[in-house]
Amino acid sequence: MSLLRPEKLDVLVVAPHPDDAELGLAGTILSMVEEGRRVGILELTNGEPTPLGSPEIRRRETDQATKLMGIAWRGNLGLRNRSLEATLENRRRLAEVFRNTKPDLLFAPYWEDAHPDHTAATKLIEEARFWAKMGKSDMAGEPFHPARILYYFSIHLKIVEQPSLLIDISRFTTHKRSILEAYKSQIVENQPPGVPGVIDRVLDRNRYWGIMAGVDSAEPFASREPVAFKSLQALIL
């Protein structure tokens, strides 16, 4: 699909690599799709090289996960894995995607991480969001400013997340596991025996945040800006 597709999205999840979006918010994506929202995912790189992967394997795995989520659009910006930088050219390319898909809500990786690609992605997304609204520009598309960024946790640091809000994904945990299992080369086949795998650890953390929210399972999100609600009813689960 064209990266400059003009059809509007409600939500765009930007991920450094294939599988980052699913690890961080597959349950929330499923919830938004069920609500009828047009959700897209944009990877910045193809995630390769990795020990058990290849561009072809990663593409097949991503296609399978995409079908399981039922999202409206998925694209890849084609930037270099392991060398991701928030350059002016990369900022322009990402801003053009924002201008042409016009998402009201962006999801970006949490700003603190050990993986340089993840922190570079966050910086790039924030800067491209600002550039996307500029007039008197030769960038493709009309000026547009996504109203909000929420940050998801798909991190390589052994820290406890500090979320601003939690989304109940209790009805989607089994489906989320199936989506994550699509990424066999990355989070299934490379797991050492006798220890909990990535999928179990992710779902355990979702269960922990569910306990904090008073539900079975929840995904955490952070925000640099105040989070507004139309009424306190939104806070009552």
Image: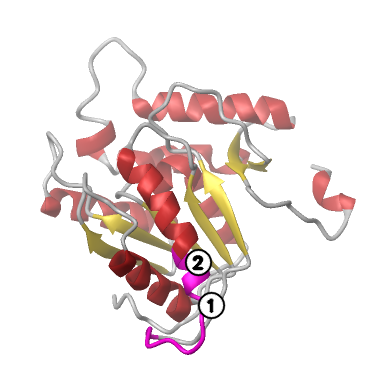
* Residue at x 46% of width, y 62% of height: 127
User: Can residue 2 be found in the magenta stretch?
Assistant: no
23 or 49, which is in the foreground? 49
Location of residue 96 in the rendering, given as x and y in whole percent from the top left corner? 39, 76
Q: Amino acid at mark 2?
A: Arg
Find the distance from the CA under tag 2 to the CA under tag 1: 7 Å
Answer above or below: position of 60 versus 178. below
- Do the residues under discs 2 and 1 have CB atoms within 8 angstroms? yes
Number of residues whose C-alpha sits closer than 10 Å to that of mark 2, classed few (under 14), some (14–19) or many (20 or more): many
Quadrant housing the N terminus: bottom left
* Residue at x 68% of width, y 25% of height: 211
Location of residue 84 in the rendering, given as x and y in whole percent from the top left corner? 27, 51
* Residue at x 84% of width, y 60% of height: 230
> Which picture quadrant has residue 37?
bottom right
Confirm whether residue 10 shows in the render: yes
Give the colouring mode of the picture.
secondary structure
From the image, tell me which residue sits under label 1.
133
> Which picture quadrant has residue 63?
bottom left
Location of residue 33 in the rendering, given as x and y in whole percent from the top left corner? 54, 61
Q: Which numbered tag is attached to residue 129?
A: 2
Q: Amino acid at mark 1?
A: Lys
In the image, is 120 to the left or to the right of 228?
left
Residue, far right = 232
**Magenta highlight range:** 128-140
